[in-house]
Amino acid sequence: MLFDPRPKERRSEIFDRDEEIKALLEGMKNYPITLLIGIRRVGKSSILRVALNECEGIGIYIDARRLYSTGGSVSQAALVGEIRNILAGKGHVGFLRGISVERVTIAGVQLKPRETTFVDLLEFLNSLGRKAGKKVIIAFDEAQYLRFYGSRGGKELLAAIAYAYDSLESLGFVFTGSEVGLLHDFLGLEDYSSPLYGRIYEEVEVKPFRRELSREFLRRGFEEVNMRVPAEEIEAAVEELDGIPGWLVEFGFHYWKRGDFERALDMTMRKARALIREELLELEKRSGRYKLILHAVAMGLTSWSSIKDYVEARAGPITNARLSELLRNLEKMGWITKEEGKYRIIDPIVEKVLKE
């Protein structure tokens, strides 16, 4: 169902993402590493789950945010424990697709009682894939959180993945990220100092819907739940929420359940404001000037010099180098983009919240 607010796992539940799913499946099949990128709430997790369910290999899904949330860092023990639990079919920490699981003996390969390192598990999974005649895909959702792995910014994890890339031919990896620049920086595929430097990879981008697709998404969603919604209400919702699938789903779900257009739109915007303001507070902890820069861009001050004037008028002098660094960081984190020398906010709901 299109208006189900949970991540989707079947293609029939996703609207107009066949090209992205096809590209991701091709990446999983043909490349050792595939990146799935896109801004927040654009539907990456659903696309990843669908592709893992449809891929020819064995798919393992891991949410890196969950690993990070348990203690503000990601330990080897937490990662190993997560994968072991998935293999043993315990709990709902992730999912395993592509083989039947019976205890911990799979396809004739025995998982030892005390596989204590990530490399041990990678070697086990490689043996599992070789025995089953399938590629094992380890997918990390919101993988930028893996930079908090260990004590060296995730370098130990990247070294293990580089070893797997070079030596374990039955393994493949998928990394998704909303903070696209941070994900690229973490993996370091083009950074000489990174263990993954120079490795070949595929990249699949998930973009927001165009206006007409947003309208069609809402029309289809309401048809599924047998609701007749006036065209002007659909148009008003698209005008407010633009093409971010997560917000369109939220609105459609509330309208379906409440039967009240104004209330559904208000509930969606209130949730959006709360989430975005929480994200902005986290951003301010890194630097108070981040929010000032975003306010400037939201107000239409899109050139480098006008942003600098705005920030200095409210927070005092800032060096050119520091401002450029902050702008680059905001681009890497997926808040803004630069086109033809002008900056703009990527998510239209973020822009509305900043203007308020």
Image: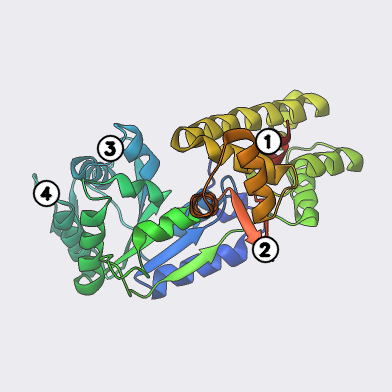
Residue type marked 4: Glu
Q: Please report the residue visible at 68 percent of the width from the left and 46 percent of the height from the top.
A: 297
Q: Which residue is mark 1?
A: 354
What is the C-alpha distance between the residues marked 3 and 4? 17 Å
Mark 3 Cα within 10 Å, few/some/many (few <14, many 20+)?
few
Residue at disc 3, secondary structure: loop
Q: Please report the residue visible at 36 percent of the width from the left and 56 percent of the height from the top.
A: 186
Ranked by sequence position, the earlier of labels 2 and 1 is 2
Of residue 286 and residue 87, the one placed in the foreground of this image is 286
Residue at disc 2, secondary structure: loop
* Mark whose residue sits in front, 3 or 1: 1
* Mark whose residue sits in front, 2 or 4: 2
Mark sitting on residue 217: none
* Mark whose residue sits in front, 3 or 4: 4
Ranked by sequence position, the earlier of labels 4 and 1 is 4
Relative side of 290 to 261, left or right: left
Relative side of 215 to 316, left or right: right
Residue type marked 3: Lys
Relative side of 31 to 329, left or right: left
Task: From the top left corner, tell me how far across and down residue 240 is, in percent.
Answer: 78, 39
Ranked by sequence position, the earlier of labels 3 and 4 is 3
Q: Which residue is mark 3?
A: 90
Mark sitting on residue 341: 2
Task: From the top left corner, tell me how far across and down residue 143 is, in percent.
Answer: 39, 51
